[in-house]
Amino acid sequence: MAEFGRRKFSATALPGFSTVAAITFIVLYAPIVTLVIYSFNASDSVALWGGFSAKWYGIAWQNTHVQEATIRSIIIAVSASAIATTVATMAALGTTRRGKYSGQTLIYIMINQPLMVPEIVTAVALLIFFASIKVATGYTGLIYLIVAHSAFCVPFAYLPIRARLEGMDLTLETAAADLYSTPFRTFRRVTLPLLAPGIAAGAMLAFVISLDDVVITEFVKSAGQDTLPTYMLGQLRRAVTPEVNAIATALLCLTVLLLTLFFLLTRKRG
Amino acid sequence: MSTSLEKQRARDGWLLSAPALVLLVFAAAGPLLIVATYAFLTPGDYSGVVWDFTLKAWFQVLFERDIFDDSISMADAHLSIFWRSIRLSLLTTILTFLFGLPTAWFIATRPAKQRAAWLFLITIPFWTNLLIRTFAIMEVIRYDGLLNKALLGIGLIETPLRIMYTDTAVLIGMTYVYLPLMVLPMFAAIDRLDIRLIEASYDLYATRLKVLTKIILPIVRPGIIAGSILVFVPSIGAYVTPRVLGGGKKMMVGNFIELQFGAGRNWPLGAALSLILLLIVSVALIFYVRVSTRSDSDG
């Protein structure tokens, strides 16, 4: 049932508002659409159209730097989202549906801290901290990036899981306990299946956030550890070719795909 | 009631949250303390720091000592970077508001079935990689870009505009990338607004301007404040957008901090600047919490 139906005299119409809204949507999408179109440009320029071609996708695909950066991005994003989602699920179980206890607000602030501190400040802090560990241990592998990404992904995984938990009532778990189910069995058989869509949504957000990160990665990475975004940032210093557009378009498609899945998972039924 | 139950609850809560807290202390909150310490140390010859306590970094934020006659003057370059960051962030907030309010209003007044689709259109750019969006706007405003072609085409200008690597470019870029952050909270606020209030005021012969200023804006105010904070905070700490569109000449605080850890080789100054940036953001967030709790108790 439509809430208001069709309004004859529109009380909600304000002069010029629809025009500005239309301009906003055009301004929001024109650059992205242009970027995608020029990724199919046959010429070497990002400004002059030379006919349709998918050759830049082939060139990007063949580029070993792009291949390595892609694999690195995926390794980091998969590991970081797995770690972040695991600890965030536990934290969500520890901070919801158990009544108030002292320190709860502190836990909440700590978990959401990466959302409040400017990324550049965290990046600089991690640069200092990890640089000294790198000097002390001599190890310069991907672990630093995975740990850094895991940390800033925690709030993004935590929030949808917490939202899902708050929407679940305790009746089913109480019923299971009444039927002599052990706490672990109740969790495995009742809580976890009910929570699964929230966990999947959290993992997906964490994955997208990790995949997109530029600033922290740029400061934490050791030499030769470019991810796709830092590789693109490095390319901008040189003459830009549609190859960057092709990489950006591929990344864009992946994000839109994951987002659509996220919305389907978190959509309220009925 | 029973304190032992409460204790158990707290213990389980902390135990379950412990892995997340350890991770965040190790790779987010803890390192901030190192930054706070470094701001009071002496820069090393090559990079890093020497463990000599000094307030020199804080002095350097505001003043500079002439290398010839040792006279002290205000560090104009530093002040102008701070001033540019604050000015551009405020302008970004205002511009995103001017575009965002009508857009949020438009989405909130669509029929219920269309609303989710319009909202999704705002959410896609919101989640799209910031670098990709910065790159996309760069291709539009560059010398041979879409904007100049369009303006030349309709005869509004005779020579292409040089927008890239100016404050204007950074402002356009930040407005573009942070616009969804303004629209989403304002939409949430407008969505709660009862249309009958507006209908009632029209029935009582209110003008459109009166309806906007006396009914809509006060009710939407929490959304406006939330949106402004969500835009201002990332703007003041922006790094990618000013780096790409300002091109190293038009630095903001974020880029200036990076410079101290790179070519500038002055880690303590970089650390002091980071703390000042953190302070500005904290003030904005505290202001937000105070204003939003006050408007909660009002309504």
Image (cartoon, coloured by chain):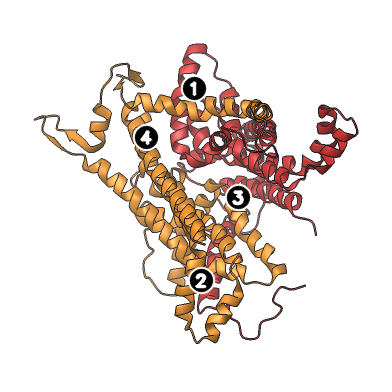
Chain colours: A red, B orange
| Residue receiving disc 2 | B216
Residue visible at 57% across and 47% down in the picture:
B129
* Front of the two marks 3 and 4: 4
Label for residue A130?
1
**Mark 3 / mark 4, whichever is N-terminal:** 3
Residue B183 percent location from the top left of the image: 54, 60
Q: Nearer the viewer, residue B119 or B65?
A: B119
**Mark 3 / mark 2, whichever is N-terminal:** 3
Asked if the residue under mark 1 is in contact with the one under mark 3, i.e. CB atoms within 8 Å, the reply is no
Q: CA distance from mark 1 to mark 2?
A: 50 Å
| Residue receiving disc 3 | B127
Q: Pinpoint the chain carrying mark 4.
A: B
The quadrant the N terminus of chain B occupies is top right
Q: Which image quarter: residue A207?
A: top right
Q: CA distance from mark 3 to mark 1?
A: 28 Å
| Residue receiving disc 4 | B275
Q: Nearer the viewer, residue A226 or B209?
A: B209
Q: Pinpoint the chain carrying mark 1.
A: A
Three-letter amino acid code at disc 2? Ile
* Front of the two marks 1 and 2: 2
Residue visible at 65% across and 59% down in the picture:
B120
In this view of the protein, can residue B190 be seen by the observer?
Answer: yes
* Front of the two marks 1 and 4: 4
